Image: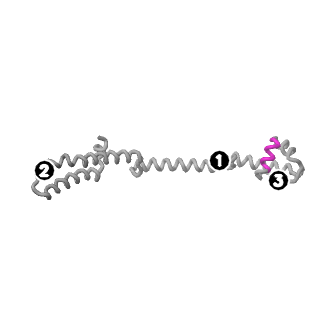
Amino acid sequence: MATQHEVAKHLGISHKMVSDMVAMGQIDKQPRGQYDLDKCREQYISKLREQAAGRAAAGDLDLAEERARLAKEQADAKEMENATARGELVYIEEVATTIEKQFTKVRTKLLGIPTKVAPEAHACATVKEVQAIIEQSIIEALNDLVGIDERDAEE
């Protein structure tokens, strides 16, 4: 039987490391001076094997868990790349910019309706004719919203 100091000397590690391993449950806690050197050596070797295999946690990080997380992130990135290539995924900034340009164009057309329609409306004989002219101009402006033409959006 041995003390933690003797276990540390036997394993070639510091007393603090032995204490830490006991605290983490990697070496079974024993009463003072009751540590079995062979059993401690086996537990220490087991810990080293786990670390070498990448299955042991290093502090707050678990290497296997981190590798799995990285693999998932890489798979997600590739999935997004493929979805973008197929046209199933778009960048929100591009969509917002295109829509903003379309709305600006429609706004300009709608605000231009009074100037465009006034001379025609003045020449009309009936209210129905004025209504038809105004309605046609509004439909023209709104038709720009129906289909987004990329060439128009770039203007």
Horizontal placement of 113 versus 41: left or right?
Answer: left
Few, some or many C-alpha atoms within 10 Å of disc 1 (few <14, some 14-19, many ≥20)?
Answer: some
Q: Secondary structure at mark 3?
A: loop
Instruction: Find residue 154 and report its horizontal and vertical position in percent.
Output: 31, 41
In depth, the one of 100 and 98 nearer the eye is 100
Of badges 1 and 3, nearer the viewer stands: 3
Q: Return the mark for residue 63.
A: 1
- As measured in the structure, the alpha-carbon distance from the residue carrying label 2 to the one carrying label 1 is 80 Å
Instruction: Find residue 32 and report its horizontal and vertical position in percent.
Output: 88, 51
In depth, the one of 150 and 52 nearer the eye is 150
Horizontal placement of 106 versus 118: left or right?
Answer: right
Question: With respect to residue 17, does 29 lie above or below?
Answer: below
- As measured in the structure, the alpha-carbon distance from the residue carrying label 2 to the one carrying label 3 is 101 Å
Asked whether disc 1 touches disc 3, contact meaning CB atoms under 8 Å apart, the reply is no
- Read off the residue under disc 3: 29
**Which residues fall within the magenta stretch?**
13-22
Instruction: Find residue 116 and report its horizontal and vertical position in percent.
Output: 18, 47
Instruction: Find residue 76 and report its horizontal and vertical position in percent.
Output: 51, 50
Hey, what amino acid is under mark 1?
Leu
Q: Return the mark for residue 122.
A: 2
Please give the count of numbered marks on the rendered protein.
3
Q: Secondary structure at mark 2?
A: helix
Tell me what residue is drawn at x 80 percent, y 43 percent.
Answer: 16
Tell me what residue is drawn at x 25 percent, y 47 percent.
Answer: 111
Tell me what residue is drawn at x 59 percent, y 50 percent.
Answer: 68
